[in-house]
Image (cartoon, helix red, strand yellow):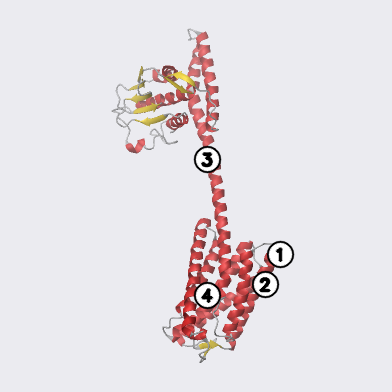
Amino acid sequence: MELDLYVAFTRYLTTFVFSFFIYQLFASLVNYTQLKEREALWPMVMCLTTAAYCFVFAFNTHFINQKLSDFLLMIFWVCAYSSFYSYIRTIEVYLKRRIKKLEFAKLYCVFLVSVQIVCAISTLLFNHNFLFDEHNYVKSNLFAQTMHFNVSPNIYGKILGGLGALVVLYTCIVIWIELNRLKRNEVLLKLGIIVTFLAVLNDTALGLEISGAILPLYYFGNAFEAVRFNLYFQRKVYRKLFNLENEVVRLSRIAQFGFAAASIAHDIRNHIFVLKIGIDKLIKGREEDPQQNYKSLNKHINKVSEITDLYMNVFNKNNANEKNNVSVKKIVDEAIELVAPKYKNSNVELIVDIEDFSIYCNETEITISIVNLLKNALEEVSFVDKYQSPWVQVHAYASKRSICVTDCGQGISNEIASEIFNFGYSTKKGVGGHGVGLAITKALLMRSGFQLGLLKDSKNTTFEVLF
């Protein structure tokens, strides 16, 4: 083979393999950022050092000066054995245990890398290398001509290199046996072991100058391992994401039950308040019509039971709640009955203006919604001292098929309006506000296919239920 053809082939092949390992490096980086496990760093280091090996290889085919070319020969060894050490560590991570038989192999890799670093520094600073001697190559040694080397291993370099080759071969055998013992059908890893085994024999022949017309092929073995390890860590990432998704589902269910508990407590409290007033009247003998009071108490007890059933259905996503055509006037009257005691005990005027029409709905759901809006408006105008004659109005519009609850407030800012329907958000924190009522109301109405919104063009604060 002509030297120019040999150089071109070396450059293109090595550049291609360099690109492959850069891709695998970024794939490993993505896996690490998802897993946040230190063990996931080892395949990254393996890909990085192998890519560096290929880069140095391709770079040295462009001759700059003799000293640099001889220095890069040491860097080949540093990259190669750093990569092999990372490979051993990654195998142990993959098998989830330390392999005692490979402790010596790891130790030798560290030793050899350290020695080569010392040699590289000595070459740069003192023009002396205790593992290589100057040598005049014959023209037939294409590899030496391509890399522009004028040094070759002395007896110490050959001993270290030979031991290094034996360590690699020994490691390959140990890993193969370990995979068989664990009954792992690892085609990629075993193929990588075979290629590494053959590549080391090839590179040893090249290093011992048995042949000078072949390329170092060590990096080919790492290609299979890089793919296999990235597949392994990618699968771990998918498993982690799947577990996180399950955890989110579990927490959302917990939050849902918490929302249900808050909703039930919030709406039952209205009926309990009416029950308490009725019972107090009976106990103190101030009830003029006890029989009517008993009917009212029984009615509200039934409503409490209905509300608990309602919320069990809501939060179990059961749409089997009974629905009928119901008069809007009846719904508003029911709601006013529940909030009347609170309005009576305040100085807030309640104005009712109803254009009756019917809607197909679950009566309890819509009644709860109107009650929450009336209570929210009452609390809002009672909370602010600046209103001398506070009022709240409930108006039903047959033409628009809507119910509006308006208070004497001057509207709500855009910033608050964007948050007001969120569960837990309240403008009255610290004075009884829990941020439950409006969130529950919107959830109930949306579930029924209706809409709840804040009218922005209204002079006063107005919530509109649109059927």
| Amino acid on which disc 1 is placed | Arg
Up-down relation of residue 70 to residue 174 (above or below)? below
Q: How far apart are marks 3 and 1 (CA)?
A: 44 Å
Q: Earlier in the sequence, mark 4 or mark 2?
A: 4
- Badge 2 density bin: few <14, some 14–19, many ≥20, Cα 10 Å: some
Q: Where does residue 300 sit, x and y in percent of width and height?
A: 51, 18
Q: Mark 3 points at which residue?
A: 252
Q: Name the residue under label 2.
A: 173
Question: Residue 263 vs residue 108: left or right?
Answer: left
Q: Nearer the viewer, mark 3 or mark 2?
A: 2
Q: Where does residue 155 sit, x and y in percent of width and height?
A: 59, 88
- Badge 3 density bin: few <14, some 14–19, many ≥20, Cα 10 Å: few
Q: Name the residue under label 4.
A: 79
Helix, strand or loop status at disc 4? helix
Q: Mark 1 points at which residue?
A: 181
Q: Distance between the residues labelled 4 and 3?
A: 50 Å
